[in-house]
Image (spheres, helix red, strand yellow):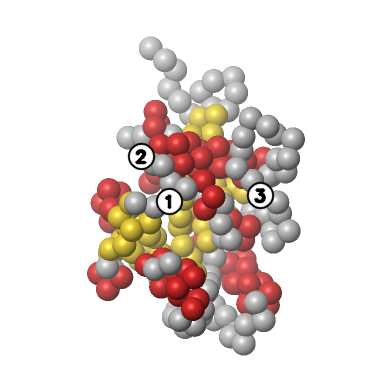
Amino acid sequence: MAPKSTFSTSIQPPPGPNAKLVLPSQDTSNNTNPTIFNDAMIIRKSVFIDEQHCTADSEIDSDDARSWHWVLYDNSAATSTPVGVIRLVPPPQVTHDHLTEAPAAAVARGVPEYDWTHEPCIKLTRVAIMPSFRGLGLGRRLVETALGWAAVHAAEIDDAAAQIAARGNSPVTPTPWRGLVLVHAQVDVEGMYAGLGFATDQSLGRWDEEGIEHVGMFLRVALDK
């Protein structure tokens, strides 16, 4: 019988706006990714690009440089192996119009990139588990890890939102984050998020991202002050 796997989680703080983030490849000469972020991208590339056939060009987006990542490692062998990932995007979030229609069309209609109008929320995205480690509750574990961290780091989340406002010369002064959490869940994992307390927002409808149907779900966490 194989030894029982043990897992550990490591956090990657936001790499920052000047980070040169790339998809991992066999040629590592131009790979300047932080180590944990690179492990996150190994998983994301395997799951989203190779398995789900999402577009490679859009896998690294403008949120990566400003987000926190957690990577889950399997430590059952001599060398730790990255097997799961989650990303926490601080406020502000991209407006819903930029998801449900072509971003260029939204821009042409004058829709701003970020939504400063509604209550600020964090967004959990890019949740992925390597195939041989699914069914062990590791996705749930990652979500709980990110939520637990957010509950005690509201000040850092507010600071990240303020930095975006400053860089964009926004006339809006960001309001403090009060614990609202958003996920854009693939419909086949809607039940997992519901089990964690997320409620589907029917007003957002259902929409297609990279050929996969999604729904919007919200949860409010209690902040540890």
Identify the amino acid type marked 2. Gly
Q: Which residue is mark 2?
A: 137
Badge 1 element: helix
Q: Mark on residue 143? A: 1
Disc nearer the start of the sequence (3/1): 3
Packing grade of label 1 (10 A; few <14, some 14-19, many >=20) is many
Report the amino acid beneath label 1: Val
Residue 110: give x, y in percent of width and height. Answer: 49, 82
Residue plotted at (51% across, 40% down): 45
Relative to the observer, which residue lies in front, 1 or 209?
209
N-terminal-most mark, 2 or 1:
2
Which residue shows up at 56% across the image and 57% down it? 61
Q: Secondary structure at mark 2?
A: loop
C-alpha gap between disc 3 and disc 2: 29 Å
From this viewpoint, is residue 152 visible? no
Residue furthest top as drawn: 1
Where residue 5 sits, quadrant-wise, is top left
Left or right position of 72 against 28: left
